[in-house]
Amino acid sequence: MGFITEGFQKGFHLIFSGDAEIYSIAKLSLYVSLFATGISVLIGVPLGSLIALKKFPFKSIVITLVNTGMGLPPVVVGLFVMLFLSRSGPLSFLGWLYTPAGMILAQVIIATPVVAGLSLSAMQTLDPKFRMQILSLGANELQATLVCLGEIRLSILAAVIAGFGSIISEVGAVMIVGGNMRGQTRVLTTATVMETHMGNFDAAIALGLILLSLTFLVNLALTFIQQRKAERK
Amino acid sequence: MIRIKDLNFTAASGFTLSIGELSVREGEVLAIIGPNGAGKTSLLNVLALFLKADSGRLELFGGDAGAAGALALRRAMSFVFSRPYLVNDTVYNNIRLPLKLRGIRDTGQIAGMLELFKITELKDRGARELSQGERHRVALARAFVTGPKLVLLDEPFSSLDARARDSITRDLRGIIKSANTTVVLVTQDHSEALVLSDSMAVMKDGRILQRGAPREIFARPVSKEVADFVGVETILAGEIAGKSGSLCSIKVGDTLLEAVSEYNEGDSVLVCVRPEAVTVSKTGESGSMRNHFKARVVSIEPWRLEYKIGLDCGFDLLSFVTAQSVEGLGLKVNDELFASFKAAAVHLIKRQGPK
């Protein structure tokens, strides 16, 4: 029990002493996950909306695929992204293996189905006549979709929160694609795993605490925006 | 404004909308009435270009609707659904939305709309803070703000209480007439249709059964289906037994009725008598009424502010009687009295096929 308490003490000391390496790891974590969340939202929200609004053959199979994608194992995603980016892979020309760009790609693949799936189900909760009403007021297809998205903005924010949550704490994909290289691709999750394996529990606890704090702060900001919108409803 | 010719549409459910001919002139208010599943809303959806006809021709604003772009046509009209679908924003922004969607920056007309629909004091209120009646007023103001050439109303007041409905209907009538807007109104409410419309169409099973002036349709339905729907409760099978000028004697069972009609002796007819046309009295005085029968009261049921009296005159007859008259006459079931109605109040529908 003593080593845990000691670990926490040293962890807090590391955080508050302004350890440059720990802060650069935290910064990279936040950068990779926020960037990946942003791209996932740009792809996932329109994709989910399109699937929800349009009629096309095999729609239910496509929805099943999106829902399956919401539970993609990060390790498997990491493996395939690594294979595609590797020297003999089809995307080797990008040169993204063991770079933050590769890690972002892996996280986009994990978060996009989460954002798309939740956006899709949110859009499906909207009465189809609402969209007809907006079209009848003179909206074109894009305008009508944007007005509909405005109506389900709280659910879309929930999708963003879920998308961010699915990648900020993910370790498998970033470990495989990024390689946990010091000063280049080391992020909070991979660093925590490494420090734990090395028995540096104080550093691992410090990294874990930072990860928890960052997740809390980002979610706090998103929830604050969401609840302000809810109050205005 | 609207011309439909031989238009057919079959839904995935198998329901078929089949409109032989329908035209609505500029500034006309057409009410479409009919039972549930008659195809009224499908017709509106065809007009709003949400449904594409399988065959036939639809002309809107003088041109072929198929040739023009749906967006351009929709921007010349407005559609108000039975549920007022407001966006989650203020009343002002809801009314501004159609202007914003068209890229119109001049919002000068919004104040006028707020005033016309008596919602000026609500302009900063959120859509979800409004009562149902207020929401309907906002939806209507939003529909009229762009000065549309055509407004489609799909049972727009069905969820309102009678007081709110009457109030909005009265205001809407004035607004439609002052703006000379063409309106197609789908409704199940006969009084709403009578107040708002210049002409009326009765639909059933995807077809228009009758088109004409509202009072003409209520007084002179062309078929039993229409008569049933417009509230003619006494429909009797009979045969014209004699004719003198335009006055016919119709044999209904063992009783002879008199009616004014162009049909000929021997014609098999349905005799329609509206309950409002039948008066009852305890004395045998008929006044100028040619149809005067001894009757027995078989039922007394409250009906809105009046009573619906079921009578046995040798044939079944219904009469609306005011509450004061029921009390004054001391009416009870099995009472004997007299029922009278004018020959001109009897409408005949010629029956086809075997007698």
Image: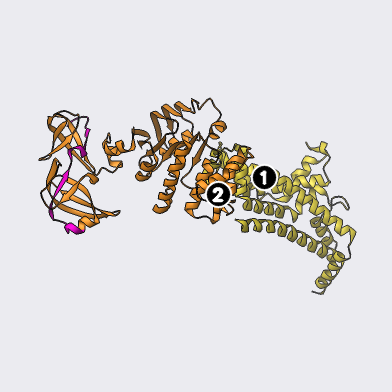
Chain colours: A yellow, B orange
- Vertical order, B61 against A163 (above or below): above
- Residue underneath mark 2: A125
Asked if B232 appears above or below B353 in the picture, the reply is below
Q: Which one is in front, A22 or B259?
A: B259
Q: Is residue A210 visible?
A: yes
Judging depth in this view, the residue of B143 and B310 nearest the camera is B143
Q: Specify the label residue B272 is tagged with.
A: none
Q: Chain of mark 2?
A: A
- Residue B185, given in percent of the width and then of the height, sits at 42, 39
Identify which amino acid the numbered label 2 is placed on. Answer: Thr
Crowding at mark 2 (Cα within 10 Å: few <14, some 14-19, many 20+): few
Q: Dot 1: what SS?
A: helix
| Relative image position of residue B283 (x, y in whole percent) | 11, 51
First along the sequence among labels 1 and 2: 1
Q: Quadrant of the C terminus of chain A?
A: bottom right
User: Vertical placement of A171 versus A60: above or below?
Assistant: below
Quickly name the residue at label 1: A44
Other residues around mark 1 within 10 Å, as few (<14) / some (14–19) / many (≥20): many
Pointer 1 indicates a residue of which chain? A
What is the magenta range? B327-355
Quadrant of the rendered structure where residue A199 is?
Answer: bottom right
| Residue pictured at 64% horizontal, 42% vertical | A47
Q: Do pointers 1 and 2 mark residues of a single chain? A: yes
Q: Amino acid at mark 1?
A: Gly
Residue B238 vs residue B201, the one in the foreground: B201
Q: Is residue A92 magenta?
A: no
On the picture, is B291 further left or further right than A116?
left
